[in-house]
Image (cartoon, grey):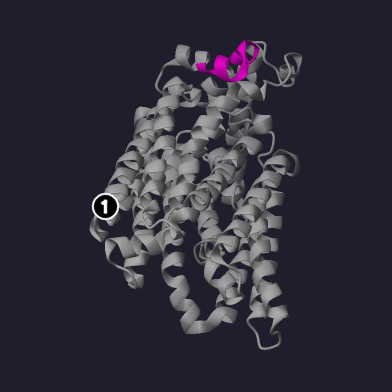
Amino acid sequence: MFAMNVDLAHATYRRNLWKDFINEYYREDGIVQGAGKDVGKPSWRHSLPHILVATISSFLFGYHMGVVNETMESISVDLGFNGSTMAEGLVVSICLAGGFVGCLFSGWIADGVGRRRAFQLCASPMIIGALISAMSKNLWCMLLGRLIVGTGIGIGPSVACLYVAEVSPAYVRGAFGSSTQIATCFGLMGALLIGLPTKDNAGWWRICFWVSIVPAALLALFMEFSVESPHWLLKRGRAAEAEAAFERLLGASHVKPAMAELTKLNHGEEADKVKLSDLFYGRHFKVVFTGSALFALQQLSGINAVFYFSSAVFKRTGVPSASANICVGLCNFLGSIVALILMDKLGRKLLLVGSFLGMAVSMGLQSISATSYVSGFAESYLSIGGMLLFVLTFSLGAGPVPSLLLSEILPSRIKAKAMAICMAVHWVANFFVGLLFLRLLEQIGPLFLYSIFASFCFLAVFFVKKNIVETKGKSLQEIEVALLQPE
């Protein structure tokens, strides 16, 4: 007991010593707590254009995830695998496999060449893969194109989370972080709308792939004129460029306090010295585990089973698939807009708890609709209403918050690589939920399966309450100091 008390006292001493060290630096430079009020908050308008360019990668992620929904039947007929559910499943899942591979390397790419170049690199496979898919003459060419596209969309969202968090002013970082989810919604809805003529035009599906080249090319082009992350620049010893980046992002009056805070937090840290083993034990294990578990719970809630197979549920109730996808897309979009408004007002933790609770209730409604106690219109209303409510509550918190939260709480030294590991868990869970959902639905039935999803949602509520800290309104440096663990 005495040894534990000594260790605790030592850890507290080191934590306080570190905070005093940073505060003393601020005093020496005339930057004391509250001094920022003299110059006010930095304008969000400076960083908004750079955020919008970065969200093109999220748009492309949503587009390529949804582009085969309306077009799959035409693709299968044209390429000669009509009626093969295995082949159709491969066209969808091969993109997820590529996403996993791309995601694994995203952190090393982002740290190695910078955030801007990483965006441009992720645009290249999305252009090449879309070209191959659009010109494919058989299933194997289509699978190759989708695999290449997948590597691009595996890199893009991970880098976007880092970049948006690092270039956003603290007081709007939650809203800007939600913009990636909104861009994904636009991508999904865009793929749906562009794919609608496919039923009347057998070769239209090729146009759907050609169209995706345009935003990918714009991402590569506009990133050439966007600002590099000052966090990355400073880690590379390019302090003058970091100051210039902060001036473009925050305004001249906010450069000195931003640089002072970032300089002392990054003092003596070398991003290149981060080893893979550093992420799995020691002082960084808990935060990496928290991020990975949060992404796993997000996927085990069943959200992508709803996105991938909502049409089948609606068809059983007589609702056309196009109308079903539009309803799901609108709920996702409206929820994301509300999350953008509330993120920096209610905070990340409250939105996560409320979102997972709402998802649990929604899955409960779908479970009830699968029982023998309801039938007819009641079954249809519960099933459809539960699914739409599930998507809506997901987009309020469980959708946009995890990626934003991880980009905030991960220490700057390991952020890019740790984010890659956590996002890789997301891709793996996503893959297996999509792969096994229909088989489990046949084997154990909707009542038991939806109950399992609801249980994971309840588990997520308790996990968030116990392990997630609130980051609303705090700078990334303040968050890291608050979470600092002794060596």
Residue situated in front as seen by the camera: 11 or 35: 35
x and y, in percent, of residue 260 in the image: 57, 17
Residue situated in front as seen by the camera: 233 or 344: 344
Q: 226 left or right of 131? A: right
Please say whether residue 210 is visible from this viewpoint.
Answer: yes
Which residue is depicted at the point 34% across and 73% down?
A: 83
Is residue 354 positioned above or below 160 on the image? Answer: below
Residue situated in front as seen by the camera: 34 or 351: 351
Q: 155 left or right of 402? A: left
x and y, in percent, of residue 309 in the image: 51, 67
Residue situated in front as seen by the camera: 336 or 13: 336
Q: Which image quadrant for residue 219? A: top left
Q: Secondary structure at mark 1?
A: loop
Q: Which image quadrant for residue 95? A: bottom left
Q: Which residues are magenta?
A: 245-257
x and y, in percent, of residue 389 in the image: 68, 62
Q: Residue furthest bottom?
A: 372
Quick check: is 102 in the magenta stretch? no
Q: Residue furthest front?
A: 200
Quarter holding the N terminus is bottom right
Which residue is depicted at the point 35% across and 28% down?
A: 113
Quick check: is 251 in the magenta stretch? yes
Which residue is depicted at the point 55% across and 50% down?
A: 189
Q: How many numbered circles are shown?
A: 1
The residue wearing badge 1 is 136
x and y, in percent, of residue 323 in the image: 60, 61
Is residue 55 positioned above or below 49 on the image? Answer: below
Looking at the rendered structure, the kind of residue marked 1 is Ser
